[in-house]
């Protein structure tokens, strides 16, 4: 069946404005010549060569709206990489990412830093991978599945400062495995190993051991926070200087319960359950018994979709409609030791980062609830971490397409980049553990 792919102009809130043909000013040869060649890049070899952070393959990649050296567009050249990382069970796995080498000079102190960027929610279909969206900006597949690369704003501002950036697709996006959405370990590993891979890429314009900053908002905030927690044991070889976690999901079960019944979030719940079933085989029989035909259909139909579903599942936004018992998902999770154990593994705050951390959160965030974020900050503070919790109480409670979670991204973007520049300069990290907001 023919699939239409368009590059679209969106408002920063995600509202579609216009669509046109894809535009790239990089040489046509930078992209695979055929769809088959592109698919081959995302197919990992068996067995995987090397260890965590080693590069399996790389290729030059185009950036939509990119022409290095010209104003108003992305100031970088792009390399797509497949690298070795670890899955949720700690087994080797292949992950794809994109290294963006800035054309702007780094004018800060010391050598050029590397930002290990964790992107926001894109979906669970292979077409939603950031490494694919960066060359298209947006993708639309009729009748109602669309996604655009809204992380471009943050990427642009980082690159404009002369910072190198590597953005991971996360485990299972683009590659054959299931994307385990909001899995603490898989996401954290993917972020850390993307930084390792970028430092090992020939001609990357970086020093041998560059300073690294972990950075992300929303799903990316969870991934960055997880990477900060895992880094001391998993990647002590990286020179991580700081971590920014904006609007993070802290606890998958709490996230589901807090948002149960809210329009637009049914696919996110389904993506979490699909990932749990893929990573924890013991949960599959439980889910099969606990989900009714509606619940199973939502999980199945969400699995190949991106984040812009235009209300496809709004008739089933209450998860009590998904279960054979008529109970919401959180009650089903609490009633199953197997499910409960799997969900408990996703909770942040059980380990302490070894680097300064900035957490940005809005009091009225309708997506990633503030109480859980504050609890995580308190647990990190109790472990001795240098934590600054920036709680924005000025943004009103807003729901819909332009919710509080989206609005909070913008003030956090400016504040976080100045904060990370200060950490790279060696300035003392601000800490408000004694009076968390």
Image (spheres, rainbow, N blue to C red):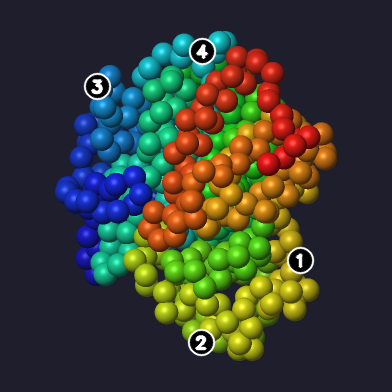
- Return the disc, 2 or 4, that comes first in the chain's sequence: 4
Who's the residue at 44% across and 60% down the image? Answer: 399
Q: Rounded to the nearest whole Å, what is the CA distance between mark 1 and mark 2?
A: 25 Å
Left or right position of 42 against 53: left
Question: Where is mark 2, residue-wise?
Answer: 293
Cα distance in 3D space between marks 3 and 1: 52 Å
- Residue 352 picture location, percent across and down: 77, 39
Sort mark 2 into few (<14), some (14-19) or many (20+) by Cα contacts within 10 Å. Answer: few
Q: Nearer the viewer, residue 311 or 116?
A: 311
Measured as percent of width and height from the top left, residue 337 is found at 78, 74
Quadrant location of the C terminus in the rendered image: top right
Quadrant where the N terminus is found in the figure: bottom left
Q: CA distance from mark 4 to mark 3?
A: 22 Å
**222 relative to 379 in the view: left or right:** left
Callout 3: 10 Å neighbours few (<14), some, many (20+)?
A: few
Q: Give the label on residue 329, or none.
A: none
Residue at numbered disc 3:
70
Residue 341 circle label: 1
* Residue that badge 4 annotates: 108
- Residue 147 in sight in this render: yes
Residue at 43%, 20% (x, y): give it.
161
Task: First in sequence, mark 4 or 3: give its number.
Answer: 3
**Few, some or many C-alpha atoms within 10 Å of disc 4 (few <14, some 14-19, many ≥20)?**
some
Determine whether label 2 and label 3 are within 8 Å by CB. no
Mark 2 or mark 3: name the one nearer the start of the chain.
3
Q: Point out the tag, 3 or 1, that comes first from the N-terminus.
A: 3
| Disc nearer the start of the sequence (4/1) | 4
- Asked which secondary structure carries label 2, the reply is helix
Figure quadrant of residue 183: bottom right
């Amino acid at each position: 069946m023919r699939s239409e792919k368009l590059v679209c102009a969106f408002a920063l809130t995600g509202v579609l404005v216009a669509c046109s043909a894809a535009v790239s000013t990089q040489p046509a040869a930078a992209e695979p010549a055929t769809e088959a060649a592109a698919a081959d890049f995302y197919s990992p070899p068996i067995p995987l060569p090397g260890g965590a952070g080693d590069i399996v393959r790389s290729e030059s990649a185009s950036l939509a709206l990119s022409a290095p050296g010209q104003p108003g567009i992305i100031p970088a050249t792009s390399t797509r990489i497949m690298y070795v990382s670890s899955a949720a069970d700690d087994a080797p796995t292949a992950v794809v990412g994109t290294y963006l080498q800035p054309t702007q000079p780094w004018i800060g102190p010391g050598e050029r830093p590397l930002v290990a960027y964790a992107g926001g929610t894109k979906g669970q279909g292979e077409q939603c991978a950031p490494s694919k969206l960066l060359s298209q900006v947006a993708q639309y597949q009729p009748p109602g599945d669309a996604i655009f690369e809204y992380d471009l704003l943050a990427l642009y501002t980082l690159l404009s400062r002369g910072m190198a950036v590597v953005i991971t697709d996360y485990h299972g996006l683009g590659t054959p495995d299931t994307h385990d959405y909001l899995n603490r370990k898989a996401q954290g590993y993917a972020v850390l190993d993307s930084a390792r891979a970028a430092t090992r890429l020939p001609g990357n314009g970086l020093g041998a051991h560059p300073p690294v900053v972990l950075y992300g908002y929303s799903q990316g905030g969870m991934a960055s926070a997880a990477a900060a927690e895992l880094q001391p044991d998993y990647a002590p070889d990286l020179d991580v200087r700081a971590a920014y976690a904006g609007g993070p999901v802290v606890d998958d079960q709490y996230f589901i319960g807090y948002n149960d019944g809210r329009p637009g979030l049914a696919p996110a719940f389904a993506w979490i359950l699909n990932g749990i079933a893929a990573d924890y085989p013991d949960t599959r029989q439980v889910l099969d018994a606990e989900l009714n035909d509606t619940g199973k259909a939502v999980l199945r139909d969400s699995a190949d979709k991106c984040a812009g579903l235009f209300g496809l599942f709004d008739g089933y936004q209450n998860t009590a409609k998904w279960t054979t018992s008529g109970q919401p998902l959180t009650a089903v999770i609490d009633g199953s030791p197997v499910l409960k154990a799997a969900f408990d593994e996703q909770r942040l705050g059980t380990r302490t980062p070894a680097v300064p951390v900035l957490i940005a959160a809005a009091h009225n965030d309708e997506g990633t609830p503030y109480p859980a974020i504050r609890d995580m900050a308190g647990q990190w503070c109790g472990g001795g971490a240098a934590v600054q919790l920036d709680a924005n109480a000025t943004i009103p409670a807003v729901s819909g397409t332009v919710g509080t979670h989206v609005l909070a991204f913008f003030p956090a973007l400016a504040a976080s980049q100045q904060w990370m520049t200060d950490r790279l300069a060696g300035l003392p990290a601000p800490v408000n553990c004694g009076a968390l907001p």
